[in-house]
Image (cartoon, helix red, strand yellow):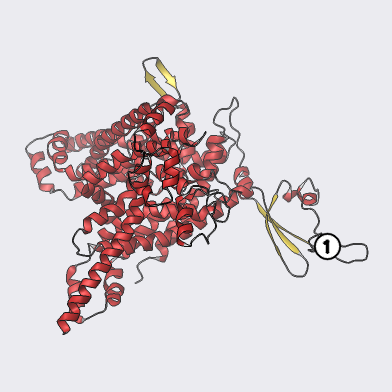
Amino acid sequence: MMAQITTDSRGLRLTLRYAVLLIIAAIFSFPLIFMIMSSLKPSEQLLSDAHSIRALLPVGDISFDNYTAAFQRAPVGLFVFNSILVTSVTVVLSLAICSAAAFAFVFIEWKGRNLILSVILATLIVPFETIAIPLLLEASKLPWIGMDGVTWGWLNSYRVQIVPFIADGLTIYLFVQYFKDLPGELIEAARVEGASWFAIYRRIALPLAGPIMATAAILKFLAMYNQYLWPIMVTQEEGYRPVMVGLQYFFQLNRAWGEIMAYLSLITVPVLAFYLYLQKAFIASIASTGVKG
Amino acid sequence: MASKFVLSNKTGWLMAGPAAFLIGCFIVLPFILAIGFSFTNQRLVSPNAADFTGLANYRQLLGISTLTLDPVKDDAGAVKMTAEGTPEYPSLRTYTRNNPDYPGLNGMREWFSFGSGGDARTYVLARDVVFLTAILNTFIFVIVVAPVQGALALGLALLINQKLRGINVFRAIYFMPVVVSIVVVSLLWRFFYDQQSGVLNNILGAVSFGAIPRVDWLGNPNTALGAIIFMSIWQAVGFHMVIWLSGLQTISPTLYEAAAIEGSSKWQTFRYITWPGLRNTAVLVMVVITMQAFGLFAQIDVMTKGGPLDATQTIVFQAVQRGYGKQDISGGSTISVILFVIVLSVSLLQRWLTREKK
């Protein structure tokens, strides 16, 4: 009798648990499913479907017309190219420069090490929003040596979107924490055998830093690809705009929701697919920002 | 031995130098510039050099004053009434426009007013009503978002921390909005909030059989900020769920086993084992949410541009409108400094309130 009740109530409780989990899953996924499904429908059907469950289903007049129209309305290919270029160059340079710095902070004795490290860690409490405006003025006056000799002002360029974001406190902090946990004897042994610091960094530290590289790369990728405040201020010229600024072409004049949904899906679905594929690594990277706090 | 030290010195600077230089140029320098510009009238493009103006920018943004007025009386000494049947007060303009008796009030505008004993009315005047509204809105946003998002994230983390088949799928779905840009989310939700075609109104109408009227969620000053708060929580709650989750996983399972043997209830287990074990995580989650929430900008820029009637003005939106829109670098920098002081004080306060009590 006793056992009977427990099994029954256990089954019921299990069903209840899954029901709760499913309802919450619907709240988080339906808006995104709606976005993707709507991108395949003509605007009139999109609006009428919004009254029923059809909004979440690929039914009716399904086509890629909205995508074609979006490419006609704005130079979408250019925006995508700009975003990929800026994001990937920043991620690669950031990993190289921040990991090298962290290596120097953890393993090498040098004058000024503690001071520089404390200043870098102190920048963690400065939100980007509080330095964006003076940085805008600074960027408008910086020199650059390029093909046409020395030029002044970085506005409307790729470098203004890349260089300020290569080094940051969080990335360095993550590498420092990781290197601290590496076995120090390994580094000592290599030193005794006469290996240069740079060789140790390249041959020993970097090959062991795979997991933290993935974490830092994912965090940087998300921050850069999704950036908005900075690019809207520094890319008045269409040629350098990334995808998020490109959104402005779709909500200014006549609002064609079908095209908007197509553009939103176009710039979001690749990231979502990338996330779902590397789900564990994405979640671990966010978790690692919180572990040691 | 000495030569080795010198060599390390050089290598150390060589390897850390690039990062130190970049952080110096693009974080430390602009931070110092912000403080410097806030005492000048620096503009983005200007033929003239900037002048030192002292605290003028701060006075312009934060200037606040009160004025208590008695109602207008007619010759017989009776209070004059307006057409609506309320006492009539002297026009504020006579005090704030070049009144030699009130030089401090010159150029101020009414922020709000309240009755202050008898028929007298106290007016709170401000030099920059929009900016003070922006500060107020940002604080409302932070005060609602920080506890609600933190608590919901903890709830989700506890839910996801169960040992159930397929739980990883749910974790992946709950986290999904975090990887989507807030700009994309904002534009998508503009459609959900729309009065005519918005999905939210469709759902509310269907559930209530048409009893709930269609609301222009983003066009109504009473609902706009709330709509943005709701959407922001939806987008970011997964982020903090993951941080709570990593905190939950640091709690030793033996503690739970001991509690089970002692026969403690679910609530007791949470109260005496889980919650104390999450102390550090809780502080971190609060500090991070607060810092992120004070930076509220993209949602505003995409959804409302600060309107309707300044109901969604925020500190960062104001900084960008001035610093970039009006090319007023000094005004934007002053707002940035004010924001930094606010963020720093709030996080110091949070750390003090949650300090280890010995």
The reply to whether residue B187 is in sight is no
Give the percent coordinates (x, y) of residue B128: 64, 47
Residue reaching furthest to the top: A148
Q: Secondary structure at mark 1?
A: loop
The residue type indicated by label 1 comes to Met
Please tell me which residue is depicted at 24% across the width and 72% down the height of the picture. Answer: A12
Picture coordinates of residue B309 (x, y %)?
61, 49
Q: Which residue is mark 1?
A: B81
Quadrant of the rendered structure where residue B137 is? bottom right
Instruction: Please state the horizontal and vertical placement of residue A246, each as a whole percent of the image.
Output: 42, 33
Location of the N terminus of chain B (image quadrant):
top left
Q: Is residue A108 above or below residue B348?
A: above
Q: Chain of mark 1?
A: B
Q: Quadrant of the C terminus of chain B?
A: bottom left
Instruction: Mark 1: give few (<14), some (14-19) or many (20+) Cα within 10 Å.
Output: some
Residue B151, image x, y percentages: 37, 63
- Closest to the observer: B258 or B7? B258
Horizontally, residue A97 falls left or right of residue B46, namely: left
For the view shown, which residue lies furthest in the left direction? Answer: A193
- Exactly how many numbered labels are in the figure? 1
Above or below: residue A42 compared with residue B300: above
In the image, B205 versus A156, the foreground residue is B205
Quadrant of the rendered structure where residue B156 is?
bottom left
User: Within the image, what quadrant is residue A135 found in?
Assistant: top left
Instruction: State the residue in front, A274 or B269.
Output: A274
Q: Could you tell whether B48 is left or right of B347 in the image?
A: right
Q: Point out the residue furthest to the front here.
A: A60
Measured along the vertical axis of the image, is residue A183 above or below residue B280?
A: above
Q: Residue B197: tell me if it is visible.
A: yes
